[in-house]
Amino acid sequence: MRYVEVTIPTGRKEAVLGILEDEEIDYVVSDEISGRDYVAVVRFPLPGEAVEGVLDRLTGAGISDDASIVVIDTETILSDDFARLKAQYDSDGSVDGRISRQELQTRAGDLTPSFAVYATMTFISALVATAGLLLDSPAVVVGSMVIAPLIGPALAASIGTVIADPELRSTGLTYQFGGLGIAVVGSILLAGLARLAGLEPAGIDIVAVAELEERVAPNLLALVIALGAGVAGILSLTRELSEAIVGVMIAAALIPPAAAVGIALAWGMYGAAAGALILVLVNALSINLAALVTLWSGGYRPTGLFAVSTARRQTLTFAAVLGLIMVLLLVPLVSATVVDVRATQLESDVETGVDTVLADSEYDTFEAETVTVELDDDYPLRSIDTVVVTITGPETDLDPALSERLVAAIEPHTEAPVEVKIQMVTTHETTVGTDRSH
């Protein structure tokens, strides 16, 4: 529910009141005595669904050119006329409970802080995310998402495009690219200091850290997160839901991958950095594209036939550019997904083959412990490198005949030559005696 106040300029009073009468809106008029070029102030309650249509009519009558319009969110309005008006718009259902275009434009601006504040918060968020990735701490990584002020800029470009607001669109794009650049630079600085200080986790390959590995070698599942973030972000704004939770989701798609880019660069792993950068760009483009489609399908348009035509052309152009770049960037993600699927299938096939060999009565004292398929380090386009089979048995040394049979059972399932490692874990039987003396 909204309470609207319109300051009417000289010569516009009849037009304003005529529109309100035509819409059957209950209103109150008071004289304007400030001495400025206003003749009256009119106040009236509106259902949220009615705001856009009424304000568009006032704009069409030339009211907004030199008038002041204030829209206030209200908790309760007790009025029979308002109840009738609300029931009318509820039964219409043409805007499905969304807020007005004017309010959406304002909210997008309110969620976009000054660039100095935005840059500082993004820089801090990137530092926290970098620390969380290096520590392999999911809790710290999540903390970095909470403080990242990304939801406003991430959605502003799409909102500005759909409603033909070039300033809002430009602000959104500038903030997004600038923020991601700041995040990468911040991550490089902290990761570089960590490397100089010898803080590489446990002395292992840096990308072997679980929280980092999934971001330097992404697959198509990452696309689902970004698309969901874009749709949820727009719905949270247009349906007056909590933006804070959705903001964390958007930050999850952007800040940790950007930090992964900086870490990989600091360690000189340029292939891994490329993989993380692809993830950052795909996620950013996906959020914008999902927001753009959701807004347009939700019926948001500027006023005026010419403005609608311009917005449609800009929206289609923006969507086409986003889609084309995404298709190009999705090639390595598709390749990574195919490799992951093949690795999973190979692991299952190898397990079956190993179990078949060990089912032979000659080897019934052995059991398959684990089967692991390892990928190489050629980021971002990795491939299957090694199959590691661990078996348990009573013998200390692995029987060469058994090893040959296991390799022979594995090789038919591999599409290209891979290294096969057979590991033996010796088991020992322990006899437990029972004391029956009294």
Image (cartoon, helix red, strand yellow):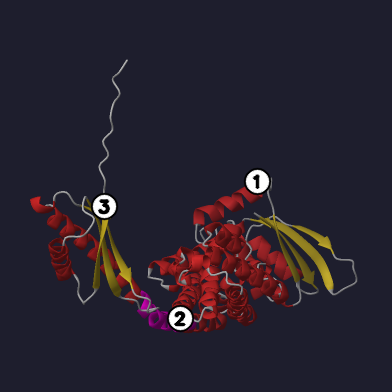
Residue at label 3?
A: 426
Q: Position of residue 13 (x, y in %)?
A: 76, 69
Separation (CA) of disc 1 from disc 2: 62 Å
Q: Residue at x 50, y 77 (%)?
A: 264
In the rendered image, the quadrant that contains the C terminus is top left
Q: Nearer the viewer, residue 200 or 175?
A: 200
Mark 1 or mark 2, which is nearer to you? 2
Mark 1 → mark 3, Cα distance in angstroms: 84 Å
Where's residue 402, x and y in %? 14, 61
Task: Please rate how many residues cluster around mark 2, counting C-alpha atoms within 10 Å: few if below 14, some from 14 to 19, many from 20.
Answer: many
User: Which callout, 2 or 3, points to the residue nearer the camera?
Assistant: 3
Question: Mark 3 belongs to which amino acid?
Answer: Thr
Sequence-wise, the earlier of marks 2 and 3 is 2
**Residue 300 appears anywhere in the view:** no
Specify the farthest residue to the left. Answer: 361
**What amino acid is at disc 1?**
Asp
- Reading the image, the residue beneath label 2 is 274
Q: Work out whether mark 1 precedes mark 3 in sequence or the reverse, and give the earlier one.
A: 1
Disc 2 to disc 3, C-alpha distance: 43 Å
Dominant secondary structure (helix, strand or loop) of the stretch shown in magenta: helix
Q: Residue 414 lies in what quarter of the image?
A: bottom left
- Mark 1 highlights which residue? 80
For marks 1 and 2, the one nearer the N-term is 1
Quadrant that contains the N terminus: bottom right
Looking at the image, residue 51 sits to the left or right of residue 293; the answer is right
Vertical order, 227 against 438 (above or below): below
Q: Quadrant of residue 109?
A: bottom right
The stretch of residues the image draws in magenta is 318-333
Looking at the picture, how far across and down is residue 143, in whole percent?
Answer: 60, 60
* 381 lies left or right of 352: right
Pick whichever, 394 or 120, lies toward us.
394
